[in-house]
Every structure is written in structure tokens, then in C-alpha cells.
Amino acid sequence: MVLGSVVVYGHPEERTAAQRRAFERALFGHTDRSKNGRYAYERAGYLTGKPHVVVRRAVLLVPLDEGDALAAFVRARGAWAWVRRVELSAAEARRLYPLPR
């Protein structure tokens, strides 16, 4: 039995679309373009390089030890977060806990 954390987050109703987009960029990262798209720069987010599974919008599966840290990141940016331990399927476990090469 392999355990992971499910993190569900959301925004207060008074948040504007620009504030929500800035939050998503801080969480997932984004591609910044300049000179009419000629140059592209990858901007890292909190989850860049960390194993995670996006189940649905605002629902993430992360390794067990990462759940509370992710919730703290989300709450520090003015959103609410809900964290629970879950049992992972075999496919989810392979994505969250890859074998060392």
C-alpha cells in the first residue's frame, strides 16, 4: 500500500482573473515570451521538477511528505487548501515515486 497526499485548493470569490492567473503561474510555472514570440524563457513554479499528478483543476496528487508544504505554499498566497492522505493506485504510485535509475 503506497500513500500520497491529495491537495484541493481554491480562491476567494473576490479574486480577479489576473490574481488567479498569477497564482497558477507561481504554482505551475509558465513560458515567458519576448520579441513577438521570438524568444521563450521557461519560468519555474513551485511544482516544477517535483512529482505531481493533476487530477482535475485545483486537485493535485503529491507524495506524502510534500502535501503539507504545498498547502502552506497555497495558503501563503491567499488561497484555501485541503489536504488528506490517500492510497495510490499502482500507476499513480509510479508517477509520484519513480524508481531511481
Image: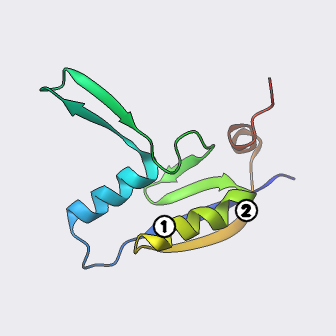
Residue positioned 26% across, 73% down in the render: 15
Neighbour class for label 2 at 10 Å: few (<14), some, many (≥20)? few
Marks 2,1: beta carbons within 8 A: no
The relative height of residue 101 versus residue 55 in the rendered view (above or below) is above
The relative height of residue 54 versus residue 67 in the rendered view (above or below) is above
| Residue 101 horizontal side relative to residue 92, left or right | right
**Residue 6 in picture, x, y percent from top left:** 63, 62
Mark 1 lies on a secondary structure that is helix
The amino acid sitting under disc 2 is Val
**Residue 39 in picture, x, y percent from top left:** 24, 23
The one nearer the camera, 45 or 52, is 45
**Residue 12 in picture, x, y percent from top left:** 34, 78
Residue positioned 30% across, 57% down in the render: 22
**Residue 101 in picture, x, y percent from top left:** 80, 23
| Residue 15 horizontal side relative to residue 77, left or right | left
**Extreme residue in the right direction:** 1
Q: Which mark is residue 20?
A: none
According to the picture, the residue beneath numbered tag 2 turns out to be 86
As measured in the structure, the alpha-carbon distance from the residue carrying label 2 to the one carrying label 1 is: 19 Å
The relative height of residue 10 versus residue 35 in the rendered view (above or below) is below
The one nearer the camera, 71 or 58, is 71
According to the picture, the residue beneath numbered tag 1 turns out to be 74
| Residue 3 horizontal side relative to residue 68, left or right | right
Residue positioned 74% across, 47% down in the render: 89
Residue 91, quarter of picture: top right
The one nearer the camera, 22 or 6, is 22
**Quick one: label 2 or label 1, which is nearer the N terminus?**
1
Residue 79, quarter of picture: bottom left
The relative height of residue 19 versus residue 46 in the rendered view (above or below) is below
The amino acid sitting under disc 1 is Val
Residue positioned 75% across, 44% down in the render: 93
